[in-house]
Amino acid sequence: MERGKSVNPLKSVEIRPLKKEDLGAIVKIDEKVLGENRRDYWERKLALMNNKSSQVSLVAEVEGNVVGFILGDVSGWEFGVPDTVGWIDTLGIDPAYQKQGLATALAQELIKKLKAVGVRTIYTLVSWNDWDLLQFFHAMGFTRGDMINLELKI
Ligand SMILES: CC(C)(COP(=O)(O)OP(=O)(O)OC[C@H]1O[C@@H](n2cnc3c(N)ncnc32)[C@H](O)[C@@H]1OP(=O)(O)O)[C@@H](O)C(=O)NCCC(=O)NCCS
């Protein structure tokens, strides 16, 4: 059987812009996914984002509950095309709602919004160990880019 799709068809999925009131739901999803409560981290992250006009972030609601999110951003916003690139910072889907196309729906909507402001290339960084994310981005058509990440332990 094809993965997901027909097991539990979701009714009334709404993709909408992320609001600061979504903090609690995002912290819960993150905790379910990673097994750790990172409220402080998310508080800081969303506060920083709310101050940035270049952020494009969305949530997926099912029957009124936030069950997934995607955080995106645009660099070079001030300078306009052709240097405008988009970033996907992070995304997460409540494990109970995974494999039903929600991340795809969120990413497609984000891509549409990024395209509308002139973005032609989207970057994201994924840990080599995050196989579900790697598989997901592969399924979305992402390929390895020309940049490599460098690090220095200090
Ligand atoms: C990766 C993730 C976003 C996928 O969300 P999702 O809503 O289940 O994804 P979709 O149903 O849209 O999947 C689309 C495609 O991606 C691929 N895919 C998604 N999850 C996969 C998995 N666990 N294993 C293999 N492939 C996967 C499949 O090709 C799938 O297509 P298919 O259903 O036709 O096979 C979700 O598993 C997640 O949130 N993981 C945790 C990510 C994380 O650590 N975030 C930071 C903290 S919250």
Image (spheres, helix red, strand yellow):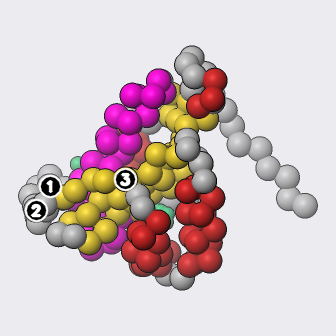
Q: Which portion, as a residue range, is magenta?
A: 93-119
Q: In terms of secondary structure, where does tag 3 sit? A: strand
Name the residue rendered at 22%, 70% in the picture.
64
Tell me if residue 122 comes above or below residue 73 in the rendering. above
Between marks 2 and 3, how big is the CA–CA gap?
A: 19 Å
The image's mark for residue 17 is 3
Task: Tell me the kind of residue under disc 1.
Answer: Lys
Between marks 2 and 1, how big is the CA–CA gap?
A: 12 Å
Label 2 or label 3, whichever comes before in sequence order: 2
Ligand 1 lies under 8 Å from the Cβ of mark 2: no
Report the magenta stretch's main SS: helix
Q: In terms of secondary structure, where does tag 1 sit? A: loop
What residue is pinned by disc 2? 11
Ligand 1 lies under 8 Å from the Cβ of mark 1: yes
What residue is pinned by disc 1? 5
Q: Quadrant of residue 139?
A: top left
